[in-house]
């Protein structure tokens, strides 16, 4: 599914950059969030264009597979899944968490653009993780 999805992204970006922008807006947000923007809001976002470098990101997504190195990660790791992510289904986040020994997992009730939909909740998850890791490091040092 992911390979097919990224291939579609790539083809849309190459064929019609504006249509690709519409596809991103449709798939990056939850349905409720897209509806809250209204037609004018969505058109404004689409007219703003697609972020620079996204074509390179798509190409990397089509080629890169880090599955084999995940078990070697030893650094404290927080994996955050987005429950309504249409681009990277939350099952992938859960699998990533399962593959990184000792990682911590959290989920946001958001789409792929969770950083914009739920910025305060995301920041709180990261803050808690950092503080927890700092406290653990201090306890180990003592």
Image (tube, rainbow, N blue to C red):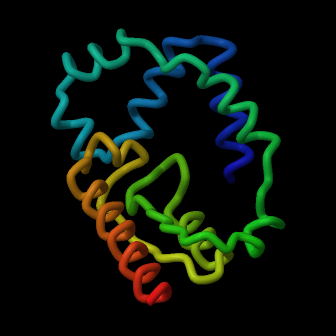
Residue 34 location (% of width, % of height): 26, 36
Question: Who is closer to the viewer here, 99 or 39?
Answer: 99
Residue 51 location (% of width, % of height): 49, 20
Q: Residue at x 30, y 69 (%)?
A: 128
Q: Is residue 19 above or below residue 5?
A: above
Residue 42 location (% of width, % of height): 28, 22
Q: Residue at x 63, y 19 (%)?
A: 13
Q: Is residue 98 left or right of residue 132?
A: right
Question: Who is closer to the viewer here, 135 or 21?
Answer: 135
Find residue 7 and report its image quarter: top right
Residue 4 location (% of width, % of height): 72, 44
Q: Is residue 55 left or right of residue 49?
A: right
Find residue 133 and report its image quarter: bottom left
Q: Is residue 78 left or right of residue 45?
A: right
Q: Is residue 91 left or right of residue 31?
A: right
Question: Who is closer to the viewer here, 103 or 113?
Answer: 103
Q: Quadrant of the C terminus?
A: bottom left
Q: How many marks?
A: 0
Q: Residue at x 16, y 36 (%)?
A: 36
Q: Is residue 60 above or below residue 3?
A: above
Question: Who is closer to the viewer here, 18 or 80?
Answer: 80
Q: Residue at x 64, y 81 (%)?
A: 101
């Amino acid at each position: 599914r992911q390979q097919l999805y990224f291939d579609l992204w790539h083809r849309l970006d190459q064929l019609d950059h504006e249509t690709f922008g519409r596809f991103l807006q449709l798939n990056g947000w939850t349905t409720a969030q897209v509806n809250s923007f209204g037609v004018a809001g969505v058109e404004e976002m689409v007219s703003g264009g697609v972020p620079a470098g996204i074509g390179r990101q798509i190409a990397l997504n089509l080629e890169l597979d880090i599955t084999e190195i995940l078990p070697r990660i030893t650094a404290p790791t927080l994996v955050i899944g987005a429950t309504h992510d249409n681009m990277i289904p939350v099952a992938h986040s859960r699998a990533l968490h399962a593959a990184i020994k000792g990682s911590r997992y959290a989920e946001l009730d958001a789409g792929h653009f969770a950083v914009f939909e739920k910025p305060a909740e995301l920041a709180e998850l990261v803050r808690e993780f950092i503080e927890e890791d700092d406290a653990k490091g201090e306890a180990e040092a003592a």
